[in-house]
């Protein structure tokens, strides 16, 4: 695949931690209106697997309200399945959006992935 200098790139990749039924989804690039369909498709596969999800967002270069809405929608869908969504590595614009919109208590973010995993394990027990 060739990408011109003008094209935006958004990528996800998933690592499974089978011992705790957890998937870690790394988001990279720009999560906005143009990339949300890719995000929804990728995350939809995780919903089918009924796993807890940690989203590592430290490689997100940009996120807009559409991207945050997609994260909230994912959180709601996971909760309907009895599962959780936590974020890791929030920074910059995402942190600002979470605070301005007062949803930092909805999309909980941890600095380290080990802390998010510990939170998932504590709620499972």
Image: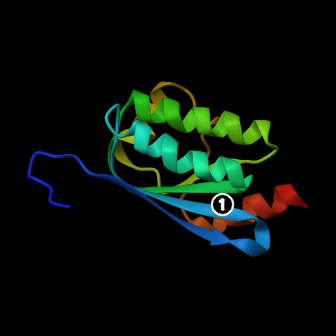
Q: Nearer the viewer, residue 45 or 124?
A: 45
Residue 17, x across and y down, in percent = 68, 72
Tell me what residue is drawn at x 84 percent, y 55 percent.
Answer: 123
The residue at the far front in this view is 1
Q: Nearer the viewer, residue 55 or 42?
A: 42
Tell me what residue is drawn at x 59 percent, y 45 percent.
Answer: 44
Report the quarter where the C terminus lies: bottom right
Report the quarter where the N terminus lies: bottom left
Q: Secondary structure at mark 1?
A: helix
The residue at the far right in this view is 125
Q: How many marks?
A: 1
Residue density around tag 1, few if under 14, some if 14–19, many if 20 or more, within 10 Å: many
Residue 77, x across and y down, in percent = 69, 36
Residue 104 visible in this rendered orientation of the protein:
no
Residue 41, x across and y down, in percent = 50, 44
Q: Is residue 122 left or right of residue 96?
A: right
The residue at the far top in this view is 101
Residue 25 visible in this rendered orientation of the protein:
yes
- Asked if 108 appears above or below 11 in the picture, the reply is above
- The residue at which mark 1 appears reads as 116
Q: Nearer the viewer, residue 34 or 89?
A: 34
Tell me what residue is drawn at x 42 percent, y 37 percent.
Answer: 37
**What coloring was used for the rendering?**
rainbow
The residue at the far left in this view is 5
Q: Nearer the viewer, residue 59 or 32?
A: 32
Q: Is residue 64 left or right of residue 104?
A: left
Q: Is residue 33 left or right of residue 69?
A: left
Tell me what residue is drawn at x 68 percent, y 34 percent.
Answer: 76
């Amino acid at each position: 695949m060739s990408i011109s200098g003008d094209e935006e790139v958004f990528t996800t990749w998933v690592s499974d931690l089978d011992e705790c039924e957890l998937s870690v989804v790394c988001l990279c690039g720009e999560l906005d209106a143009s990339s949300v369909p890719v995000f929804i498709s990728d995350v939809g596969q995780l919903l089918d697997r009924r796993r807890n999800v940690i989203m590592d967002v430290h490689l997100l270069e940009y996120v807009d309200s559409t991207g945050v809405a997609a994260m909230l929608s994912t959180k709601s869908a996971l909760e309907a399945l009895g599962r959780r969504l936590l974020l890791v590595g929030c920074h910059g614009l995402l942190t600002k959006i979470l605070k301005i919109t007062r949803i930092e208590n909805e999309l909980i973010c941890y600095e380290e992935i080990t802390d998010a995993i510990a939170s998932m394990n504590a709620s499972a027990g």
